[in-house]
Image (tube, grey):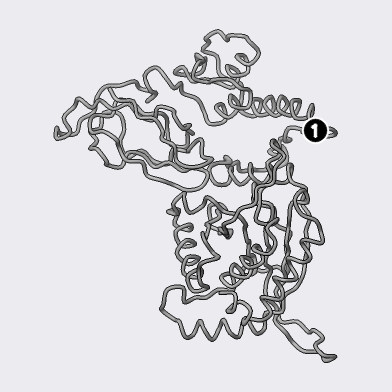
Amino acid sequence: MFEFKLPDLGEGIHEGEILKWHALPGDIVEEDAPLVDVETDKAAVTIPSPRGGAVVSVAGEVGDVVETGQVLVVIDDGVAVEAPAKRIETQPNSAIIGRPVPAAPATRRLARELGVDINTLSGTGPSGRVTPDDVRASADGVLPAATSASPMPARSDDVAAVTRMAANVSNTIPFLDLDPMPDFSKHGEVEIEPLRSIRRKVARKMTTSMVLVPHVAHMDDADVTELEEFRVRMKERRQGQPGGKLTLLSFVIRAITAGLRAAPAFNASLDPFKEEIIYKKYYNIGFAADTGHGLVVPVIKGTDVKSINEISAEIEDKAALAREGKLPIDDMQGGTFTITNVGPLGGTALIPTINYPEVAILGMGRVQEKPVVRDGQIVIRKILPLTLAFDHRVADGADAARFVSELVRNLSDPNLLLLDT
């Protein structure tokens, strides 16, 4: 028997949600054939079978969460692959023989929060499934007795978990008071959707950023009239060529890179444990992409040595892959600074949340024609609103003002960007 464990899927990824099984217990599977689709916090991946043979058992059902290093599937690699497909009698609940134990994703999450190794528990739920009560009893040092009684309703489990979490958090953050969600269904019809995969990762990361990082925002407007005229001319010339769309974002990325070279504090990270500021000598600019199923941040690497055309081509390719859920994990790692552009969707301005552990993020609003005063005359110009949100632990307001002013200057004159390139 071969126990295949969920492999390391990349930096900072510790679990994945099962999307689809390509082989179930009793199926014959070939080596390198698709085995299971797993969605991580960053992307969906298809994991191939590492061995040929008969599938004996799998880790869980669609929607369950498996952790890195957890046994994903057991394969009898002594069965000839060329044999006709057949079903092998196995456990009716599809659980792996021995470990890990069957448990719902919420129960596994509770176990992690309480520091309980869920694989050491004997479940009291149906078919030996570990319940939240089993986890809490283990955390309290009490071993639950097996029972056929129905588990506590899910809402009661949620209330108990939130109450316990709130008590722990309140001990460390003064005046923080977390109450369980009220029962909204008392007032009308509701629909409940589990917080999973990319959406869950965004929730965790944004909470970490907003709680840990003291955000400050500096705002300014860039006159991009000449830049837009130049961009449109070049776009018409380069139709059909790689990077031919030449979006405004590609010019902003080039301008941001020039600014980061002059202001390294915004291309850094702060280690709160070692009390060190880490200045990065490379420039990998991420851009927020709305995929329809969650926000991801593709990263354009080495923007200091790439032309605007090359950056534009990468934006097109990576944005398309992100929308399809096929963006490689490596293309979402290693970022040093992030840009979020809500302009195409509307809105005049925004205050973005820093993509922790970075220390700054630029928010782009919508380019609008506005009346402005130039040389004592009122003229119509194309104005781009910009907001720099930054970590006040590593930079001050004066630093941000100088950084954004230089950015505005570069975007106002396309010749400056061409000289920098």
Q: The residue tagged with tag 1: helix, strand or loop? A: loop
Q: Is residue 150 left or right of residue 314?
A: right
Q: Quadrant of residue 196?
A: top right
Label 1 sits on residue: 173
Q: Nearer the viewer, residue 136 or 223?
A: 223
From what the image shows, is residue 359 above or below residue 401? above
From what the image shows, is residue 275 above or below residue 74? below
Q: Nearer the viewer, residue 324 or 386?
A: 386
Which residue shows up at 71% across the image and 73% down it?
A: 408
User: Residue 90 at what x, y percent from top left?
Assistant: 30, 21
Question: Quadrant of the image for the C terminus?
Answer: bottom right
Q: Quadrant of residue 404?
A: bottom right
Amino acid type, residue under disc 1 in the picture: Ile
User: Residue 277 at what x, y percent from top left?
Assistant: 69, 46
Q: Quadrant of residue 275?
A: top right
Q: Nearer the viewer, residue 291 or 271?
A: 271
Q: Is residue 151 left or right of residue 93?
A: right
Q: Is residue 71 left or right of residue 175?
A: left
Which residue shows up at 36% across the image and 19% down it?
A: 97
Which residue shows up at 50% across the image and 81% down it?
A: 235
